[in-house]
Image (tube, coloured by chain):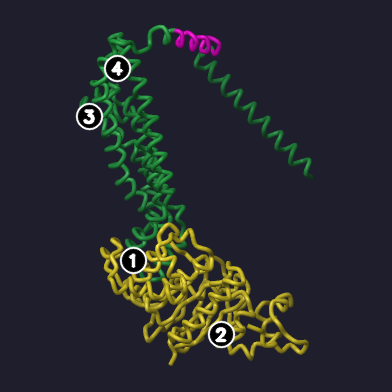
Amino acid sequence: MALLKLKNISKYYQGPKPALEKVSFSIDEGEFVSVIGSSGSGKTTLLRCINRLIEPTEGEINFNGVEVTKLRKNELRKVRTKIGMVFQHHNLVERLTVLENVLHGRLGYKSTLAGIMGSYTKKEKKKAWDILEMLGIEDQVHKRCDQLSGGQKQRVGIARALVQNPKMILCDEPIASLDPGSSKIIMDYLKNICKDMGITLIISLHQVNVALNYSHRIIGFNKGTIHFDGPPSKLTHKKITDIYGSEQIAESYDHDETGNITAAAG
Amino acid sequence: MENDVFKKRRKSTLLLAVIIAALSVGSAIITQYDAGKGMLSIFKAVAWGIKNFYPDRRSLVRLPEIFIKLKDTILMSIAASVAAAVIAMALALMGSRSTRVHVFFTGLARGIGSFFRNVPLVAWAMVLMLAFNQSSLTGFLALFLGSLGFLTRAFMESLDEVGENAVEALKAAGATYYHIVFQAVIPSSMPQIVSWLLFMIETNIRDATLVGFLTGTGIGFLFDVYYKSFNYHVASLIVIITVIMVIAMESVSNIVRREIL
């Protein structure tokens, strides 16, 4: 069953050229979808339109049977609790501890006063703790986030998304500012989250190789429109050139002379 | 090409020097200020100070009285700074880019901030004296209004620096405006906010002395009384103790700053 359905989503910023132009696709529950494309192709705008951090100019977004674009403030809050989000720059409150940052994921469920006071139930704290344990950073719980490494911060970001109890997590270039080692750890955790917890993932990525290795399905963007939508096995060299609009990108993934992409190791 | 850049820079430096020189000479002529005479009178003043303006043994008797007034002054400065900080915070939240609800409020908060900041403290004290006569309330309000303007601006800038990142993350999690303010924006900017508040308290202790002249309260008043009755020994003692106090306050707040950062 489709969890997320986009129909003719367009986004115009200033100027006549749209950042997204009539984008339509639907994503099933439990799918691991990578969104690729060069900088400025509309990946970030797309992800932010889904939970309306950016308001789409036109089109319909159906999430879990609810028409997201028509929601009022409080209903939108409710939908957002079911959509986690992970960011390139982690977007943590650096001066607060790991646990406090993770618990921010529960704010969507809180009354105004409870949220201001930062009062969380025992159950919520236990859940946050369990998630941190699962992600292997339980010994950092009471450390301030500005003392963590980039990879650890991103795990805190993932924990914050998970504590929401989401049906879907949007990841906006989650490994773009991490070293290769940390990137692999993060991608492996995300893969497990999708497989074991059944959470749908939409990840925007710069590395074609990573997209090929991890996802069930790849959506390729160029100038705000979809140029490819299908399983990694169908993504040919020609298609990739079409998405990125140049030959240079071919260096960043493995392929043989006939243009077939060879299964990358790892 | 490169040569050109250096030439240009030298030219603009020279131009700046000429402008500064012209301004100083021009204003000296307009105000009929004689620089040579001014410099000389500094020496005269110092000589007079060494001869007359020092505490003697008899002036030490006044110490308890000085300390009581000093305590009043310090407490008033702290009260005025903290009260101003609360209101300034509300205005800054309204006006900051990361927390504003509407652009209109940014203009409003900035306007209020710069109005209160740009009216000199002494002018506030004079105006308020018409309403409240010479009383501590006048002094308090003058310091309060001056601090309000300054802190609004300072806080707004601190909040701006927090940036959109954490705000965006909390919004995506379904947090409300107030959640975001209290869970992300304020915790992130806390060190700067406390730092500005400490700075304000220090400044206010200095300024309270001045305001005290006018409003007849605190350490400033005490200085005024002794100075005008030609009791320079006590007056100088007051100055020395005030200076020591300000330096002590500064070191205390430096320690606090280091701890919270």
Q: Which residue is mark 1?
A: B176
* Chain B drawn colour: green
Decide: few, some or many residues near mark 1? Use Cα within 10 Å; few <14, some 14-19, many ≥20. Answer: many
Q: CA distance from mark 3 to mark 4?
A: 16 Å
Q: Which residue is mark 4?
A: B224
Do callouts 3 and 2 mark residues in contact (Cβ within 8 Å)? no
Q: SS of the residue at dot 4?
A: helix
Decide: few, some or many residues near mark 3? Use Cα within 10 Å; few <14, some 14-19, many ≥20. Answer: some
Mark 1 and mark 3 lie on one chain; the one further toward the N terminus is: 3
| Amino acid under disc 2 | Ser
* Chain A drawn colour: yellow
Q: SS of the residue at dot 3?
A: helix
| Amino acid under disc 4 | Asp
Q: Which residue is mark 2?
A: A215
Mark 3 and mark 4 lie on one chain; the one further toward the N terminus is: 3
How far across and how far down the image is residue B24, in percent? Answer: 56, 22
Residue in front for this viewpoint, B55 or B144 = B55
Q: Which residue is mark 3?
A: B136
Q: CA distance from mark 4 to mark 2?
A: 80 Å
Q: CA distance from mark 3 to mark 2?
A: 71 Å
Decide: few, some or many residues near mark 4? Use Cα within 10 Å; few <14, some 14-19, many ≥20. Answer: some
Where does the magenta region start and end?
B35-47
- Determine which quarter of the picture holds residue B132: top left
Label 1: chain letter: B
